[in-house]
Amino acid sequence: MYLSDRVKSLAESQTIAMARKSRELIAQGINIISLSLGEPDFNTPDVVKKAAEKAIEDNYSFYTHVSGYLELRQAICKKFERDNGLSYTPEEIVVSTGAKQSIANAVLCLLNAGDEVIVPSPYWVSYLELVKLADAKSVVVNTSMENNFKITAQQLEKAITPRSRVLIFSSPCNPTGSLYSEAELSALAEVIKKHKDLYVISDEIYEHINFVGKHVSIAHMEGMKERTAVINGVSKGFAMTGWRGGILAAPKWLAQACDKMQGQFTSATCSITQKAMHTAMELPVETTYPMRDAFKRRRDLVVKGLSEITGFKCNNPDGAFYVFPEVSYFFGKSFNGKKINNATDLCMFLLEEAKVSMVPGAAFGDDNYLRISYATSDDRLKEAIQRIKTATAKLS
């Protein structure tokens, strides 16, 4: 067998790996509570499903423009104007097979070998691997729970070198749920604007799961729209993960480059998905509130539950559907001869002993933490917390 160095250098997504492990155990009849995958447990809105059904009935089954059909891109432009105060033309929009492809397109179009990408940690699992695919270098900037896991303008300035080309981050953030305020984004923007060759990939896929107020994009800061690729999609806010519909909004020169790149990989995303996305884009933002409110209730449930377990330390996330507790209290403790050295060990212990699946913080840049997804029912969350409490009490 012969495999390229490129694919051999890539790490497997640990979120996908843990989800696969959970499914394997469930298939064996083991009662696993999976808190590992970032997927809403809600159904796609009925009106969106009906739009897809109509598209099938109307035989809307042929290739579209690589970037998506024109009326869809026009609807996306109206969404950005309505929800974000951002003015785009259809030529500045590229629809892809999910936000992950949108990010990959931007990374591959902006970076050359040896270029540097500033990545605040904790980070989403795929950022570093996509940078690696571009033969570029990730410059990881560590943040802390004390600052709600957000990079400061001072940290950003210190990380910039002559090889810096991109800052990539998510807000609301996967894995921490942190949300950058307008003032924090403005401060970052002032630093970025001093460096003419530095661009931003702003991952805003969790836009609609925001517990503290209106979503703000860094592209809305003065002088930043022409320096920013905004990444969005329908998977999280509209519970459409399996539909694979991503969005990139960027300056025309970059959008055209991404269209060219995508044209050699996948061409357009599914024509039926595009029709479903079109309907989702035209729904009033209030449509997303019931799911947002359910996630807020679950956040409160999980944070309260974890605070009652000795050894778990967590902040109160402002968005997404994750908590990212610090668990170093358990390091050095053992049970049945198995020693906990880091969060990865604790994760495996909890999978085996509590039958609860989570993702170790090493996947996101810090093995002192665990990522817990609360995208499941209240009852399952309560049961998971009780199982975790019972299992960790055995460690000494």
Image (tube, rainbow, N blue to C red):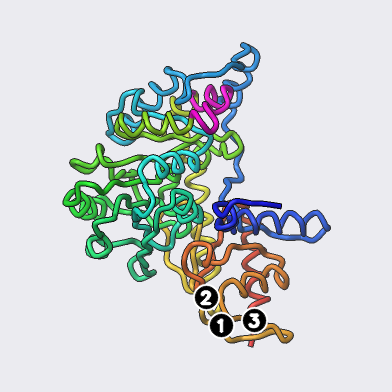
The C terminus: image quadrant: bottom right
Amino acid identity at mark 3: Ala
Dots 3, 1 in contact, CB < 8 A: no
- Numbered range of the magenta stretch: 263-278
Say whether residue 273 is magenta: yes
The mark that comes first in sequence, 3 or 2, is 2
Dots 2, 1 in contact, CB < 8 A: yes
Q: Which residue is mark 3?
A: 393
**In terms of image quadrants, where is residue 46?**
top right
Q: Nearer the viewer, mark 2 or mark 1?
A: 1
Residue at image point 67% right, 51% down: 2
Residue in front for this viewpoint, 215 or 230: 230
Q: Locate residue 31 relative to residue 210 in the image: left or right.
A: right
The mark that comes first in sequence, 3 or 1, is 1
Q: Nearer the viewer, mark 3 or mark 1?
A: 1
Image location of residue 211, percent across then percent down? 40, 51
* On screen, residue 196 above or below 234: below
Q: Nearer the viewer, mark 3 or mark 2?
A: 2
Q: Which residue is mark 2?
A: 327
Amino acid identity at mark 2: Val
Image location of residue 301, percent across then percent down? 53, 61
Circle 1 Cα neighbour tier, 10 Å, few/some/many (<14 / 14–19 / ≥20): some
Q: Which residue is mark 1?
A: 331
Image location of residue 162, percent across then percent down? 24, 56
